[in-house]
């Protein structure tokens, strides 16, 4: 088993952030040069939707997640593990660092089971094998992870070997498995808002859980908050920040940006 590393930061890169060609990737390169170990987990739902439309494959979204049949899974795998992943890898290399793109299937990194019949081949993470990430980090690479996993548990005979998974919980599970110092969500919103719509700068884990239970945290914020809570269980601090703000990532690492930080109780 590879030795654990210190100073690991897991960054969930939202597709809308990368599409805006902001400063995030330059910040990531700078953080690596400072000695931080960076792992990127990316989305790409808008690109997948665009290609599904181009191919004439209908899309159904339930609670912010894509119902995934066999045809949709093929497109998800091709676009996320191929086009989107390699664009991010190429951009990082062009910015001056070294990166390697992998999926959750590579090295048995992410192992999942199908959630339910309604969502089809959409999976939930059961286990993370951090060894591929640790090996890449120790070799000086930034791993860039596409959220497609192995169908490792309760797979019916004849079913595909892969599952589509939500990148948000994948990032939380990866952060917990690595014992990461920090999990950062780079999104297109400035953070979490309370019931009156006011921005919240800091939350305890119990307060974040209450926002979930009350429905104040809703839509796409739900999997992000749950992922933050998962990361906290592994010892990481967690935050949600607006990735479209210039150099917001460096500001967050150097002293806290104007996002929402979720901390352990106590």
Image (spheres, grey):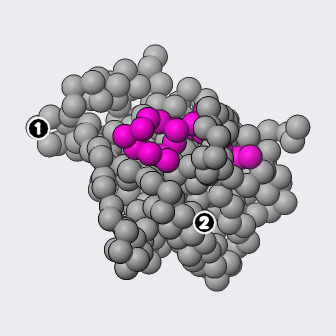
User: Closer to the camera, 69 or 176?
Assistant: 69
Q: Where does residue 78 sit, x and y in percent of width and height?
A: 57, 69
> Where on the picture, by quarter, is residue 236?
top right
In this picture, residue 121 sits left or right of residue 203: right
Residue where numbered disc 2 is placed? 81
Q: Where does residue 119 sit, x and y in percent of width and height?
A: 40, 43
Q: Earlier in the sequence, mark 2 or mark 1?
A: 2
| Residue 170 visible (yes or no) | yes
In this picture, residue 6 sits left or right of residue 159: right
Instruction: Say which residue appears at 33% left-offset and 61% top-offset.
Output: 59
Farthest residue toward the top? 266
Instruction: Say which residue appears at 34% left-offset and 29% top-offset.
Output: 208
- Magenta-tinted stretch: 108-126
Q: Where does residue 86 sit, x and y in percent of width and height?
A: 62, 74
In this picture, residue 226 sits left or right of residue 218: right
| Residue 181 visible (yes or no) | no
User: Closer to the camera, 81 or 53?
Assistant: 53
Instruction: Say which residue appears at 69% left-offset and 61% top-offset.
Output: 102
> Where on the picture, by quarter, is residue 145?
bottom right
User: Magenta stretch: residue 66 in it?
Assistant: no
The quarter of the image holding the N terminus is: top right
Residue where numbered disc 1 is placed? 196
């Amino acid at each position: 088993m590879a030795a654990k590393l210190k100073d690991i930061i897991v960054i969930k890169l939202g597709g809308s952030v990368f599409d805006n060609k902001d400063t995030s990737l330059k910040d990531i390169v700078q953080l690596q040069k400072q000695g931080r170990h960076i792992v990127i987990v990316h989305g790409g739902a808008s690109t997948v939707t665009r290609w599904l439309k181009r191919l004439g494959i209908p899309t159904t979204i339930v609670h912010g997640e894509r119902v995934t049949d066999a045809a949709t899974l093929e497109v998800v795998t091709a676009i996320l593990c191929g086009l989107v992943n390699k664009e991010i890898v190429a951009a990082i290399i062009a910015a001056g660092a070294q990166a390697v793109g992998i999926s959750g299937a590579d090295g048995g990194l992410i192992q999942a089971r199908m959630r339910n019949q309604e969502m089809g081949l959409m999976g939930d993470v059961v286990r993370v094998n951090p060894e591929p990430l640790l090996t890449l980090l120790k070799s000086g690479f930034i791993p860039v992870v596409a959220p497609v996993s192995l169908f490792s548990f309760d797979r019916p005979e004849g079913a595909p070997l892969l599952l589509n998974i939500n990148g948000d919980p994948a990032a939380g599970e990866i952060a917990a498995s690595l014992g990461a110092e920090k999990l950062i969500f780079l999104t297109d919103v400035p953070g979490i808002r309370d019931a009156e719509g006011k921005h919240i700068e800091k939350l305890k884990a119990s307060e974040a859980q209450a926002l979930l239970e009350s429905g104040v945290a809703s839509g796409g914020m739900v999997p992000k908050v749950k992922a933050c809570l998962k990361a906290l269980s592994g010892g990481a601090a967690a935050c949600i920040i607006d990735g479209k703000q210039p150099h917001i990532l460096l500001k967050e690492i150097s002293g806290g940006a104007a996002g929402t930080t979720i901390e352990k109780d106590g």
